[in-house]
Image (tube, grey):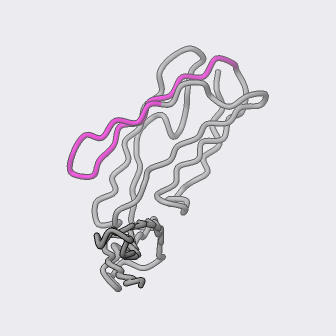
Amino acid sequence: IGFPTSRGGGGVTTTSSSSYVQRSDGKLTSHTRYDTIERSTSYSSSSRNNNYAIVDASRVRAHGDGLVRAYRNEKATFTVDTRDSGNAMLMVGVFGPKYPCEEVFIKHLGNNQYNVQYTVREKGEYMLIVKWGDQHIPGSPWHIEVV
């Protein structure tokens, strides 16, 4: 006999199915199987719907010299403010004429603000991409000439 049950919340659904078998010695044994499914969703407005935080990358702000210029073998920095933008992952990529940037550091400063540092090794034109969830933030991608 199977008794399927389901409980979910926070983007995770766990389903369990139990079966009971009566053995010849009169004892009842049970076998339970658990399956977990994770759901990921992002939206493009700034309100709440169905208990999911809505992601709105258009409300993210970035500022700092690292968005405008960078110097070879020196740290370039900028700040990203994600307040009022929903819950998502900050993703930063720096791509050069030959290779992607080897070092990009993101530090959460608290209050949904992040400090980003990157160091490039070669001169040339680079593209800096900043995404909140799967969406570009305003201004992204930036084109930076490294000298």
Q: Is residue 12 above or below residue 88?
A: below
In percent of the image, x 37 and y 42: which residue is there? Answer: 79
Indicate left or right for 44 with 120 as reference.
left
Q: Main secondary structure of the magenta part?
A: strand
Q: Is residue 118 above or below residue 8?
A: above
- Which residue is the extreme one toward the right? 98
Which quadrant of the view contains residue 116?
Answer: top left
Whether the magenta-drawn stretch holds residue 59 is answered as no
The one of 97 and 27 positioned closer to us in this rendering: 27
Q: Is residue 104 above or below residue 12?
A: above
In percent of the image, x 48 and y 27: which residue is there? Answer: 76
- Expressed as whole percent of the image width and height from the top left, the position of residue 21 reads 39, 75
Which quadrant of the view contains residue 63?
Answer: top left
Whether the magenta-drawn stretch holds residue 116 is answered as yes
Q: Quadrant of the N terminus?
A: bottom left
Indicate left or right for 5 with 121 as reference.
left
Instruction: Tell me the magenta residue range.
Output: 105-122
In percent of the image, x 39 and y 67: which residue is there? Answer: 31
- Expressed as whole percent of the image width and height from the top left, the position of residue 27 reads 28, 70
Q: Is residue 138 above or below residue 126?
A: below
- Expressed as whole percent of the image width and height from the top left, the position of residue 122 reads 69, 18
In percent of the image, x 73 and y 28: which residue is there? Answer: 99
- Which residue is the extreme one toward the left? 111
Q: Quadrant of the C terminus?
A: top right
